[in-house]
Image: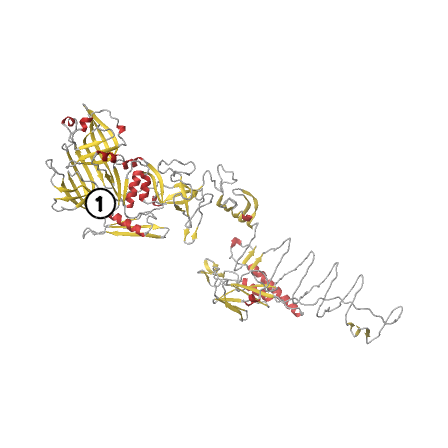
Amino acid sequence: MASRFVGGQHLVEIETALPGAFLVERFHGQEAVCDSFRFEIDCISTASALDTAALVGEPLTLRLQRADGSYRHWRGLCSQAAPLGSDGGYSRYRLTLEPWLALLKLRRNALIFQDRDALEVLERVFADYPQAAWRFDVARSLPKPAITTQYRESDYDFVLRLLADAGLAWRFDHAQAEDEENAASAQGDGGHTLVIFDSQAEVPTASPDTLRFHRTASTENEDAIGHFSELRQATPDAVGTASWQAEQVEALSASALGDPAGPNLPRREVYSVPRSGRYAERDHAQTTAELRLDALRLPQRLHAGSGSGRGVDAGRAFTLSQHPDLSGQAFVPLRVEHLAANNLTSNAVAILDTSGLERGSYRNRFLAVPLGTAIVPLPRPKPIAPGAQTARVVGLADAANTVTRDHQVRIQFAWQRGAAPTYGGANETGSGAHPDGHAPGDETSGTWVRVAEWLAGPNWGSHALPRIGAEVLVEFLHADIDQPLVTGQLFNGEVAPPFAAGQDSPANHIGTLSGLHTQSLDGSGRQQWVVDDAPGQLRQRLHTTLADSRLELGYLIQHGDAQRGALRGQGFDLATLGWGNLHAAQGVLLSTTARANARSTQFDIAEAVAQLKGAQNTAQALNDAAAQNQVPALRGNPEQAAFLAAVDAQQDGKYDGDVAGQPASKPSGERRDGGDPVERFAAAMLVAESPDSLAATTPASALAYAGGHSHLTVQDDAHFAAGQTFAAVSGAHTALYAQQGPLRAIAAEGPVSVRAHVGTLELLADQSVTVTATDERIDVLAKQKIVLQAGQTRVTLEGGDITFECPGNFTVKAGMHPFKGGEGAPLIMPALPSGLAEAFKYYGRLDITNQDGKPLPGKRFKLVDKDGNVVKEGKAQAMTTEYHEQDEFDVLTAYIGGESRGWEVMEFSEPLNPDEREPLTSDEREA
């Protein structure tokens, strides 16, 4: 049989892995640009039980004899081999010829390609197929997206989708070996090559390169095209596209416009909105629009032909001759359908079915476009992401997180295979060419994925980036697998919620805790915001383990991370093991006065104002009484009045005009405005008031300082007690005045000393002065003279003399009246210290900044006292901080750029450098 089938010349011949086993009866096949070829070949064989398994996957060559006696070859792989039955000594088989590309239909994969253009991705896919042979004929550069994902998609569908998306066409070239040696060499790699080309590639020519337009008949010796007609149809004539680019914060758009097809047709634009980030730059958008227009307009002018031209080849140009209208024009077939019946002997034909095609003949039909027409495939639909997925956040080794400025992280899905898959994932990648896979488990995984927040805007919004190892919920914009977006974070069996409760939880509550719990990057500390909704025990807690600093509001309890402890109280608790600072630039109010239903404003201190007014009246009454008795006036009274005016809403302690467009008045009745003004402090002051008592205690020392006056007014009694020493010192004068009751100075155990170091010491009484020494003596000493006088009687001790003067009797009563000679004793006077304390210096600092605290170097300023005199002016230096000192206390106003602001005054015993707290140098004084 083998010699019988091999011998002789046949129109159609075949070469398989079983040499000489088959004789072709007929074949039917199709080949096309941007599609695979497929030939179904019916063969006969004298063997009824051939091993068809030996054929599948092996090279297969189909040969068709041309008019000149040479053979045209179609080479590929045998993808199917099936017996069709037998009759007598012959059996029929059907063999299917397909390219190596058909093998890609047999593998489905899930794979992420990073920073690769379409051609680089194809090379990686093709590398897993030993039979693959390909060639690129692409002139333009292709974009490199951050990721290209193949997900639940066959390699075949994935490759074709990439080619169409890139606007690349493809065809197959078959090795046309003219002798057995070259044919065997070509057969070694499958004998066919996938050629991927763009619209700029040169179109190859067919063999033969010219076909005549002529009737087709068995009597003709040359091939011909018997039918050739033109097909016209309306197609879109414009394409528009736009895609949002988040990194550039703009939509990249482009459009392409073709020539109008007719004067009466409207504009036929196809507007597409691909996924966000589809175009990296505007040129890419423009190229895509032009390619889409070329693909849409490809059917605008087609030519349908049929005949016996055995050289018609998809993707190869031929020239038409002998046509009345189109002679000399070249065309490129896009799709060709082949049909041939072999010239078999009568013995072999006897068992064959009638095919409708004359024995020993070949026919085809095809669609072609004029040479020069851009051949671009239409986009293929992309598989839709089936829904949200979960992934793990990955990043740099030993780091807590790896992020970008744009709120992005790296993630790795559970289905990614490779060297470091997600726990329990697959290391085996199924790829011999790339065994490392695409699951590195580090910062090189995938691409930067944006993290969605519940609030986001220009310089405002929420911010919570997932850390490495966290499980996140990933959704896909437009259901596009190449557009992952982290939309949430998940707890799992490994990571429990910080306030876990309910079933299987050791917490002593039913889930009343909610809030936020974070941990430091090195795991050394944590922070919490807890909201406790336990019935009747509402509370909030803001806490950091650094210095155990916390603010708790409402129902106060001992709190563990997720445990509720014993009661500590109610209200608020602000505590820290570190330092604390309560600062308000416009004023601070500390108050324990409560209003019904909290119906009040922020600085409503009407009760305290009433008390301060009473204190002002008391101080003024006592001041007037003291002045009548020649006691120096209370100089702090005017400051007390000024303080009261600053906090009293009936004076200066209120808002003036509107505040941010809203009237600064309290609601009145059913109206939102029209009532009393809203209170505020007119100056930066601190007020502490309570309807009951105030206490300040410390086991150490307490310090109070006032650069101006310190004014203390008490309606009832003022008590000052010291366990050891009570000292009151004044730089000028001291006055003790009692309006009605006595004034006592008592030393229970030590001496009492009343001194006048420079001036006169006077003891004045409206009635009597009694000096009594109960145990020892009374000494009256004077350096020059002592005068004792009662009425008109006087005793004078001066020098060595004693003089008695009286207008009446001088009586001396004694048991004896001895008068001895003169004697004397030295006078020892106690030493009194001399000298005065240095005059006080008053010191102030002005920070020249704008409302945001930014320095204003070069800004002019001036300091003005309360009489309107300019005491200092100049221009701010680079540090924008100015210092000033003077001998007398005063309140200065700083004018900066025409705007007034308060001047902070600080008192020092000598001028100080505020940075180093050392005396100013002469240069610094000048500055």
Q: Residue furthest bottom?
A: 807
Q: Is residue 240 above or below residue 683?
A: above
Residue 98 showing in the rendered view: no
Q: Position of residue 572 (x, y in %)?
A: 54, 50
Q: Which residue is mark 1?
A: 203
Q: On the image, which quarter does residue 492 sit in? A: top left
Residue 796: x and y in percent read: 79, 73
Q: Secondary structure at mark 1?
A: loop
Specify the farthest residue to the front: 181
Query: Considering the image in quadrants, where does the N terminus appear?
Result: top left
Query: Total of numbered circles in the picture?
Result: 1
Please tell me which residue lies in front, 104 or 184. 184
Q: Residues within 10 Å of mark 1 (few under 14, many from 20)?
A: some
Relative image position of residue 548 (x, y in whole percent)? 55, 48
Is 217 situated left or right of 99 in this image? left
How far from the left and from the top, in percent, is residue 720?
Answer: 67, 59
Q: Which residue type carries mark 1?
A: Val
Up the image or down, 373 lies above or below 65; here it is below
Q: Is residue 37 left or right of residue 903?
A: left
Q: Nearer the viewer, residue 216 or 660?
A: 216
Q: Nearer the viewer, residue 462 or 360?
A: 360
Looking at the image, can residue 840 be seen?
yes
Quick check: 449 left or right of 55? right
Q: From what the image shows, is residue 238 above or below residue 359?
A: below
Identify the residue at the far top of this view. Answer: 88
